[in-house]
Amino acid sequence: MAQFDTHEVFNQSPPYVDVDLFASDPPLQQAVATNGAGDEAGALSKFGRHWGAADMFEAARAANENRPKLRTFDAKGFRRDIVEFHPAYHQFMAESISSGMTAMTWTQQGRRAAAPAEVARAARYYMIAQVENGHMCPVTMTRAAVAALAAEPALLAQVTPKIISCAYDPSVRPWTQKAGITLGMGMTEKQGGTDVRANTTRAEPAGEGYRITGHKWFMSAPMCDAFLVLAQAPGGLTCFFMPRFAPDGTANGLRFQRLKDKLGNVSNASSEVEFANAFAWRVGEEGRGVRTIIEMVQLTRLDCAISSAGMMRMALAQAVHHARHRTVFQRRLADQPLMGSVLADMALEVEGALAAMMRLCRSYDLAPTDAAEAGRARVLTPVVKYWVCKTAPALIYEAMECLGGNGYVEEGVLARLYREAPVNAIWEGSGNVVCLDLLRALSRDHEAAGAVLAQIARATADLPGGTDALRFVERTLSGAGAETHARAAVEVLALLAAAEALRASAPEIAELFARARLHERSGRCYGSADLSQSEAMRLVERNLPPV
């Protein structure tokens, strides 16, 4: 019988699926316990097994290969302004919302839930980010919107129960008729971008609310039930709550022009929109729109850092898993010193990002009752967001290289992660914006900032390079050229915060991290840290224990 097969498949790593994303991640377990959520371990392991299942990875592939579509008109020419999604996208939305990703932060009254709610949520969000990231945009905005709505207590009382209900309802109908809702955001315009005070969209008082006319260059998650938007009211730039349907039940004046054709984040829809006399309720006082919405932005920035750290973790796991199963030059890749150095250096970065992020979440947990922790959250949110989100793309690229050509093809996970990673550094304040935000925090809340730096100094003084690094930060941020050199100072401050956090959860890793990142300031490419072979092996096995 003729045989046309020319080869058999061997020396390929098996798919990295059907894994417990929590039990296989000792650094995550330690960070959760150190930051007060150790009692969640059983629930987190169950969560990790569910999200690490093969069918979840397959659903992520389907959601990203089948992009959302905008249906502007129906067959008769009537406006619809509906976004259609693949069923896998709705599956992820339902999974995340039902597991509390919009609800865990808040009580029924819209106040902060008791600690360790933020840490427990972050651990779950970190695992979700390892599987599918696009749907996390509306999930993040929905949970964060409660912080902005606090400026309008009557509206907050109506909206909060629908956010914390853990119900996902994708039907297109008025938000008041639904058990659960999602919220989007529209801030930037063509001419302004980050400079939202340059917005030209107008809001005129009209009856019980306002009528808004203008445009938004980016309107995130246009399928949501309502949006927080910025517009120029008579008293200045103001925040508004704009529902998809007006109070009388008619379609509101949101005219979606197109969906953005993005580099990544393709399972999620981002749109350009015009407001044609659209109805909205004011949130907060006129002229205080930026101050109102910044409460929301703080939380969305935190989620950007969590998401990027999660993507870094999955990239590392993919690289280590492949290296353990691939043989090159008669040896497993994982046993070759150069590859071991690369994987270990990447593991150090992932551990630092995870530790810094989780310690920041702990500050959010404690902020309502601890002024020092509230100050820490204000000061370090832009710092951690800057470093983690900027680190992710380079680390994911390195993981792709560990897989060679297999890492570069779309069938694998890493190509999608690589296209996804840059967006978190751009959304909610790009690098320069968050550096300027830190400088503003230092000038406006000098006492709180000084207390944060003093705390970090005490925790890192005896780590390699800790004292010199802190002196550099203080000298740079207090000097005449602070704005010019802010990026360098913010990066070093983030490394210090990571070393401090590692000191609490994994002291031996903190020593290695400080030596490689603060004292030696190793080269810009992974694999250049001065780690012994035994240290490298220990790091890799700690981050993904052999099975």
Image: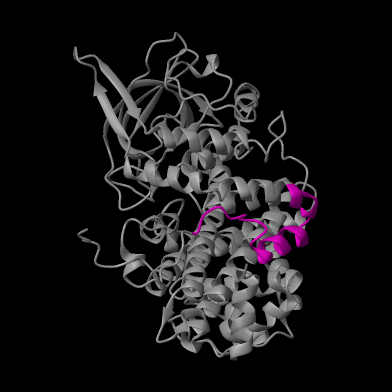
Residue 484 point in image, percent of width and height: 43, 74
Residue 51 point in image, percent of width and height: 57, 47
Residue drawn 62% across and 70% down?
Answer: 546
Q: Is residue 32 magenta?
A: yes
What residue occupies the far front of the structure in this picture?
A: 1
Quarter of the figure that contains the N terminus: bottom left
435 and 223: which is toward the camera: 223
Quarter of the figure that contains the C terminus: bottom right
Residue 290 point in image, percent of width and height: 50, 43
Report the magenta residues as a range. Answer: 16-42
476 and 72: which is toward the camera: 72
Residue 236 seen in the current view: no
Residue 103 point in image, percent of width and height: 64, 35
104 and 538: which is toward the camera: 538
Q: Is residue 245 above or below residue 8?
A: above
Q: Is residue 244 above or below residue 414?
A: above
Q: Is residue 243 above or below residue 217?
A: above
Answer left or right for 30 relative to 318.
right
